[in-house]
Image: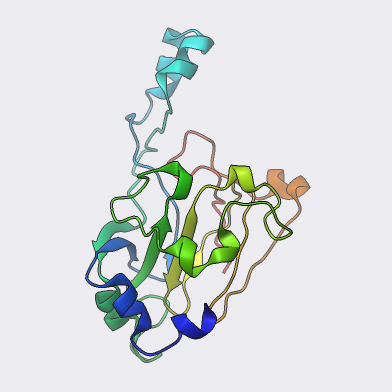
Amino acid sequence: AVERWNAPNYMERLMNTVPHRTEKSMNNHFMYWMKPNLAPGTLAKKRAERRPERARRFGYHVEAPANWSQPTEMMRMTYKDWVEHANVTDEELGPDKPHWYYRLIGCGELGKCDGGSSEYLFDELTFFQPKPGLYMVEHDKQKGIHCRFGMKGVIAENHFDGSRNSIAVLGGERRYILSHPDQCELLQLFPKEHPSARHSAVDWS
């Protein structure tokens, strides 16, 4: 896979002109967020009005804090367009310049989880196929393949995920900073109703 994916023009032929999910940030920080479905100050009122069991059936609550604005812009673009953004010199890039974070998603057994789902990822990256083996500990809980293409200097903000991750780097370099789960209470994580729940309010850079 590494040899194929780094061969000239292979990725462009693989993805053709299909636009895929892309995030744009005005700097090199990418904070996850969910679209709020509650106005500021309404969550406490809703909790008081509903019995706990009824609230669970109602669905997720994400309350927009006062003066909150979405940290990134969601869009779709082709691989060729993303490469044009990514192939710039260090002088043109810089941490305070716009960055784009490109993503391919293979849904697998989840079905149609993304508008531009890339099911060929399961053929390209066979070690991520949901089947018993040494590499994947809980293959029956596999939730698809997410391939991220980041520009130089991209930072995904500190966070935890609710399930196991199996990671492979197929090109370039990526640094991970890990902490023990017993440190969660020290990481200043946003509350679960926040648009960026599971993520730290601290800038680790």
In this view, the residue in front, 128 or 184, is: 128
Q: Can you see residue 162?
A: no
Image quadrant occupied by the C terminus = bottom right
Vertical placement of residue 127 versus 86, above or below: above
Q: Can you see residue 18?
A: yes
Scheme of colours in the image: rainbow
Image position of 50 (left or right of 135): left
In this view, the residue in front, 149 or 141, is: 141
Point out residue 53 in the picture as x, y percentages from the top left corner. 52, 11
Image quadrant in which you'd find residue 10: bottom left
Image quadrant in which you'd find residue 49: top left
Point out residue 188 in the picture as x, y percentages from the top left corner. 61, 47
* Label total for image: 0
Vertical placement of residue 195 versus 74, above or below: above
Image position of 81 (left or right of 62): left
The residue depicted at 72 percent of the width and 57 percent of the height is 179
In this view, the residue in front, 168 or 100, is: 168
Image position of 105 (left or right of 201): left
The residue depicted at 28 percent of the width and 51 percent of the height is 115
Image quadrant in which you'd find residue 149: bottom left
Point out residue 92 in the picture as x, y percentages from the top left corner. 33, 88
The residue depicted at 57 percent of the width and 51 percent of the height is 200
